[in-house]
Image: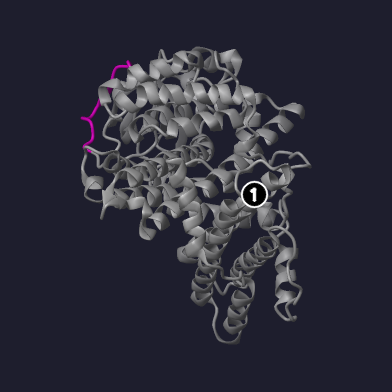
Amino acid sequence: MEAMIDQDLIRGGAFLVEESEADGIYTPEDINEEQQMIRNMARDFVQAEVLKRGHLLNEQVSLMKQAAELGLLGAHMPEAYDGMQLDMNTGTFIYEEIGKSCGSFNTTFAAHTGIGMLPILYFGTEQQKQTYLPKLANGEWIAAYCLTEPGSGSDALAAKTRADLTDDGKHYLLNGQKMWISNAGFANLFIVFAKIDGEKFTGFIVEADREGITLGEEEKKMGIKGSSTRQVFFENTKVPTENILGEIGRGHLIAFNALNIGRFKLGNMAMGGCKRAASTSIRYANERVQFKQPISNFGAIQAKIAQQAIQTYVLESAVYRVSDLLQRQKEALVQQGESLEQALLKSAEEYAIECACIKIAGSEFLDFVVDEMVQIHGGYGFSEEYPAAEAYRDQRINRIYEGTNEINRMLMVNMLLKRATKGTIDMVGPAWEVQKALTKMPSLDKPTGTFGEEKKVLKDFKQLTLMVLGAAAKMQMDEELDLRNEQEILMHGADLLTEVFLAESLLLRLQKNHNKDKHGPDDVYQSIIKTYFYDANARMKKIASDALVSFASGDLLKTFLLGVKRFTGYPPSNVKNHRRTIAKFLIDQNDYRL
């Protein structure tokens, strides 16, 4: 049963068919005094401690205890379980700052505070919460999440680990093997998924000192080398029946719901990583002299710095937008009588599409920004003596864990179509309007006002996405297409959705800040939006065309391709000069500050 939603909030996935008001979104410029104080505390911790030691495996536990002393491990936990019960937006500022540290500590921190703690908060009994959450919040214990097995990665429900009830009915015996388990080497608590009687996929809370648990050696990884990653083996491990987590046979709900918020937080931390990489690139470009001048004077380097900044700024806009959607939906559900835990769970479920979008964009934008950091450093970027090499190795895992980006893309479209089928959001009406529009002459009215062109083309982007998804869905209903066997089309659909959400997030942020005079030089922000929309226009055109030629043909395809041309009409401008404007502003600051 779907949760009720605050009438002032847009439903999850409905950004495609509805308009959001700029004044109704949250931006990082809305930070208040208390949030700034907490953000500064997290920033000071990262700079004083984590940047020095966070890449070392033998320092992880010590750093986690220090983080606990500052309240960072329990920032998102209810006060009843020794947490700080901070709002979602404050937590997002914390995760951004942690994301500016290093991949190894990021992994340790996120695995513990996210998929390690949240399953107990969401699905645990009151006794389980009272027993375990305070220990996890105060750093006495560290948690790990045991889902993946050698034969079951993305296909988590194919797990082989068994749980069999003992003759006295008081324990389950766990037998099986888990792999790629973050924090395994120093965890005191495992969230384990096993099949009762080999059939009923169920979650268990397993204390690490139970007999029958052994660990493999630390994995030799490409990156995040300072994090602990091991196999965990269970051999007749006795787990009390009261340590079943949630309902028997409903473990998939735990696994997938914990991942919803985990995906958001991964993108959140990736945004922090983008900021650090962009700042490092700017400072190095100013320091490095070639041909008797700083390399930051050269157009090729300025183009890279500008593109790093654009992607970082766009990602940040989307992250804080989703953060506030989660926060406001949680508040609305609590007011309707839901417990805090259920409100947190249901808000993440409501915005699962947006969380997947943030995960995909965050991991892939960080991938780009760090790659360009290596390139700006030249040969030094390939040296372990400089920060670029570690960042390059560490960022690669982000596109794999919390569900691969490919799985997340397919989930996004499947969830959207399911919501449309259920009537949770109305896609049929808007999709039909797009079909009718294709038979009419386009309007010749010129957009006016600040961001007029962007507002118009954003509507066009939405219509283009509806045209593609609507056409594919109709062919599915007519049994001319089976999307289960057309993963490429689903991937294109997800990319269209992501482009729309990111472009809208950027536009809404700049509209809000322009209305309230909250940002810096107009020419810089105009350059950001014009360059981003110019590039997005080209991407939308290619993605939509690639999707349509995959399933349409003949006159129908010709009609659709005319629609693609019609809906990708953002006017060109001198993006070279726009990028130089952005880069020079940042180069003068010797830092990423937008």
- Which image quarter is the C terminus in? top right
Q: Nearer the viewer, residue 261 or 217?
A: 261
Residue 31: % across, % down = 62, 31
Q: Tell me where the magenta segment starts and ends, as one range.
A: 209-220
- Which image quarter is the N terminus in? top right
Q: Residue furthest right?
A: 7
Q: To which quarter of the image does residue 142 belong?
A: top left
Residue 528: % across, % down = 55, 55
Residue 496: % across, % down = 55, 61
Q: To which quarter of the image does residue 46 belong?
A: top left
Residue 309: % across, % down = 47, 49
Residue depicted at 60% across the width and 51% down the height: 506
Q: Is residue 212 magenta?
A: yes
Q: Residue flagged by tag 1: what amino acid is it? A: Leu
Q: Residue furthest front?
A: 292
SS category of the residue bearing label 1: helix
Q: How many marks?
A: 1
Whether residue 10 is visible: no
Residue depicted at 52% across the width and 68% down the height: 538
Visual colour scheme: one colour
Q: Which residue is mark 1?
A: 510
Q: Is residue 93 left or right of residue 587?
A: right
Q: Is residue 41 magenta?
A: no
Residue depicted at 64% across the width and 37% down the height: 324
Q: Is residue 449 above or below residue 552?
A: above
Q: Callout 1 environment at 10 Å: few (<14), some (14 to 19), or many (20+)?
A: many
Residue depicted at 54% across the width and 63% down the height: 536
Q: Nearer the viewer, residue 348 or 255?
A: 348
* Type of secondary structure dominating the magenta stretch: loop
